[in-house]
Amino acid sequence: DIQMTQSPSTLSASVGDRVTITCRASQSISSWLAWYQQKPGKAPKLLIYKASSLESGVPSRFSGSGSGTEFTLTISSLQPDDFATYYCQQYNSYPETFGQGTKVEIK
Amino acid sequence: EVQLVESGGGLVKPGGSLRLSCAASGFTFSSYSMNWVRQAPGKGLEWVSSISSSSSYIYYADSVKGRFTISRDNAKNSLYLQMNSLRAEDTAVYYCARQRADFDYWGQGTLVTVSS
């Protein structure tokens, strides 16, 4: 199985900060990586697919990069609505594994 | 508008069974693979099972293999998860999700609690 490791687990930041979350795969997954945002009590929401493609309707302050085994999600200027938990997911092969999550908290 | 609505969750004793349903609308259900993903209280997301559009390909996480069965009825636009031999560690919110390759639409989830 492909293991997905996110860092950091928790991130404290202020409104307006540039935020970067890293996701590493235990083996190459090409660009078959998605990023999701989840708020408490809600379903996950797709933000980025195929490592760097922005899902329709998602603000352009979100961006993704990387390929192979190392990926990043960047929020260029953190907004109050962005405080949430973020998950990466590989869909290169089954089982389709998620990272453990990164909680973005208010500093 | 794409909608996925899960139902069937509840409280069940260890060793018991439960059948979850996911009603889909707003898209051509028979054209998409579908998935179940779960989230234990306070924990991360765990993929559970996937079924292809025509049910030809089915996959399970090792943690549920042999106990859970995924199925679909394209005529009824519905996805199912039959859960048998339930354990305390199966306690979670269960989401159904549409698979485009990534999971582009998710339901609101249904809570399954396994406890005596």
Image (spheres, rainbow, N blue to C red):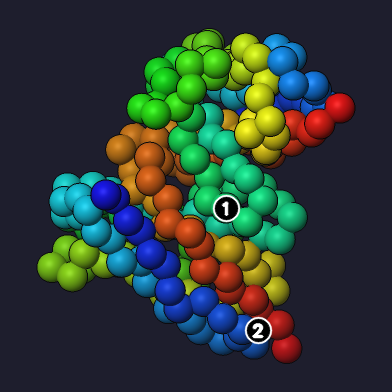
**Could you say where residue A26 lies in the image, as x and y percent from the top left?**
61, 25
**Mark 1: few, some, or many residues within 10 Å (few <14, many ≥20)?**
few
* Quadrant of the snapshot with the C terminus of chain B: bottom right
**Residue A61 shown left or right of residue A31 in the figure:** right
Report the amino acid beneath label 2: Pro
Residue plotted at (66% across, 25% down): A79
Residue plotted at (63% across, 34% down): A81
* Residue B103 higher or lower than B2, as above or below: above
Report the amino acid beneath label 1: Lys
* Residue B30 higher or lower than B7, as above or below: above
Read off the residue under disc 1: A42
**Could you say where residue A5 lies in the image, as x and y percent from the top left?**
68, 29
Q: Is residue B89 visible?
A: yes
**Residue A93 shown left or right of residue A12 in the figure:** left
Q: Rounded to the nearest whole Å, what is the CA distance between mark 2 and mark 1? A: 27 Å
Question: Nearer the viewer's eye, disc 2 or disc 1?
Answer: 1
Q: Nearer the viewer, residue A92 or B44?
A: B44
Residue plotted at (54% across, 19% down): A62
Q: Is residue A1 visible?
A: no
**Could you say where residue A90 lies in the image, as x and y percent from the top left?**
50, 31
Label 2: element kind = loop
Q: Nearer the viewer, residue B25 or B11?
A: B25
Residue B14: mark in rendering: 2
Residue plotted at (50% across, 54% down): B37
